[in-house]
Image (cartoon, rainbow, N blue to C red):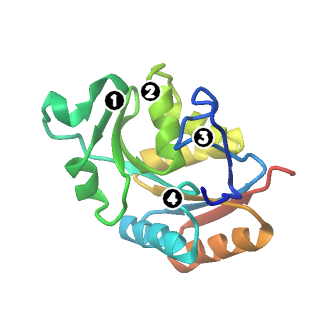
Amino acid sequence: MAREDPASVRTADPSAGSGWAGAVPNLQARTVVGVFKDSAASERAYNALLSMGFSGEEVSIVRQGQPAPQMGANETKASEGIATGATAGAILGGIAGLIALAIPGFGPLIAAGPLAVALGGVLTGGALGALAGSFAGLGIPKEHAERYEASVRSGATIVMAKAADPESTKRAADLFASHGADDVSHFDPSN
C-alpha cells in the first residue's frame, strides 16, 4: 500500500494533474521557497530536506543549466525537450531524478521534483513563460513566480518544498535560512 502523502493527492486518472507519479499537487499544502546564489548550498539544502523526511514528490530544485553536449537519439526525449542522465547528473551530482530541459525563449534548465514534471508538461505546448507558469501552477502567486523566474535567469537556484502543516513550513524555512538562502518565503493557500 502506498504511503499517504499529505502534500499531494493520489489519482488513478493518468490525464488528471501533472501525471507526476500518479499524484497531483495538493494546493492546500503550503509552499516554502528558498532562493540560493550558491548552487552547492542549494544542493545541500535539497538533500537536507529529504533527510528531514520530505519526499522527492514534495521537493523541487531548478537552476539554469549549461547547453547539453551532443547526444544520440536514444539518449534524449527530443519531442519533450528533455535530456536525462549524465548531463544533469554532472551539474548537480547528489540529486536523484534530475532532468535537463531546453525551454524555448529561456534556454537550458536543470530541474528535479514536481517542478521538473510541471516544466516537462508545458514543453509539449511550447509555452512562453513556462518557468513562471510552472511556479504558479504549484501554488506560487504570479508576481512571486515571475520574480523567481528572473532569479533563475540571473543564475540563482530555487529550492521549493510542499509542507503539509505550519510546523513543516517552519522547519523547511529554517533549513533554507541555515543553509544560506538569500531569500526565503512561504505561501499559504488560505491567504
CA distance separating discs 4 and 2: 22 Å
Graded by Cα atoms within 10 Å as few (under 14), some (14 to 19) or many (20 or more), the crowding at tag 3 reads: some
Residue 54 image position (x, y, % from top left):
58, 67
State the image quarter where residue 141 is shown.
top right
Q: Quadrant of the N terminus?
A: bottom right
Q: Are marks 2 and 1 in contact (CB under 8 Å)?
A: yes
Residue 13 image position (x, y, % from top left):
63, 30
Which of the marked residues, 2 or 1, is nearer the chain's N terminus?
A: 1
Graded by Cα atoms within 10 Å as few (under 14), some (14 to 19) or many (20 or more), the crowding at tag 2 reads: some
User: Dot 4 corresponds to which residue?
Assistant: 56
User: Dot 3 corresponds to which residue?
Assistant: 146
Name the amino acid type tagged 1: Gly
Most foreground residue, 64 or 83? 83
CA distance separating discs 3 and 1: 22 Å
User: Dot 2 corresponds to which residue?
Assistant: 123
Name the amino acid type tagged 4: Gly
Name the amino acid type tagged 3: Glu
